[in-house]
Image (tube, rainbow, N blue to C red):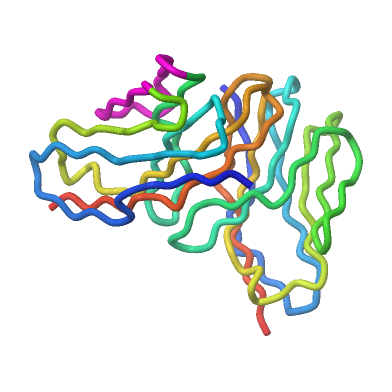
Amino acid sequence: EADIYQTPRYLVIGTGKKITLECSQTMGHDKMYWYQQDPGMELHLIHYSYGVNSTEKGDLSSESTVSRIRTEHFPLTLESARPSHTSQYLCASSESGSLYEQYFGPGTRLTVT
Amino acid sequence: QKEVEQNSGPLSVPEGAIASLNCTYSDRGSQSFFWYRQYSGKSPELIMFIYSNGDKEDGRFTAQLNKASQYVSLLIRDSQPSDSATYLCAVSSGYSTLTFGKGTMLLVSP
């Protein structure tokens, strides 16, 4: 089982603030993912990465950006938070290859006031 | 557009019964299939994966795959109230991403 960590777990922040959600994994997985999920709703892929210096946009358009400078670290940044960004953000990772399962972190619940 | 369809439920079963959760997918090239359990307010937790046609058993859980019918299911035997959660079906088509269904809510009553 992968060890994948997200910080902070909960964040309440005002409109217009810049925020960075942290995600780290200790399993050496090449692939990492960010999902957005509203309560009771489906998962939406917003960003993913094949490895260092690789980032791709997901299925859901997002105003956030990501970076992948180190294998274990995949932070997500919102330059100017808005109430519409209020959601749960889930980070996941998987080994290389198409048959490998994704493991999820505990999530960050973001509230923008 | 790759699609994964699940009945949203809720599926209600009494404690001790077998719960049957179903999933269909649109992409015939799909290669691997995953079942995740998600408790309310928590992140998804992988419980089963299956690659080949047929059944795969793990404890109380059995995953069934029929690629010809583009159908995958999850059976939970001896259902417990602690199994009450939303179950997500996810499909990989040979690329790096998974396509998730919207999930089926399972309610197991004591």
The image quarter in which residue B96 lies: top right
Q: Which span is picked out in magenta?
A: A52-69
Q: Which quadrant of the rendered structure holds the N terminus of chain B? A: top right
State left or right for residue A4 relative to residue B57.
left
B1 vs B18: above or below: above
Taking depth in this image into account, of A110 and B13 the one nearest to the observer is: A110
Q: Main secondary structure of the magenta part?
A: loop
Taking depth in this image into account, of A15 and A51 the one nearest to the observer is: A51
| Residue B3 percent coordinates (x, y) | 60, 31
Q: Residue at x 75, y 42 (%)?
A: B49
Q: Residue at x 83, y 61 (%)?
A: B59
Let me know if residue A56 is in the magenta part. yes
The image quarter in which residue A56 lies: top left
How many numbered circles are shown? 0
A38 vs B66: above or below: below
| Residue A16 percent coordinates (x, y) | 8, 39
Let me know if residue B33 is in the magenta part. no
Q: Residue at x 81, y 73 (%)?
A: B78
Q: Which quadrant of the rendered structure holds the C terminus of chain B? A: bottom right
| Residue A51 percent coordinates (x, y) | 49, 19
The residue sitting at the right extreme is B54
| Residue B43 percent coordinates (x, y) | 49, 53
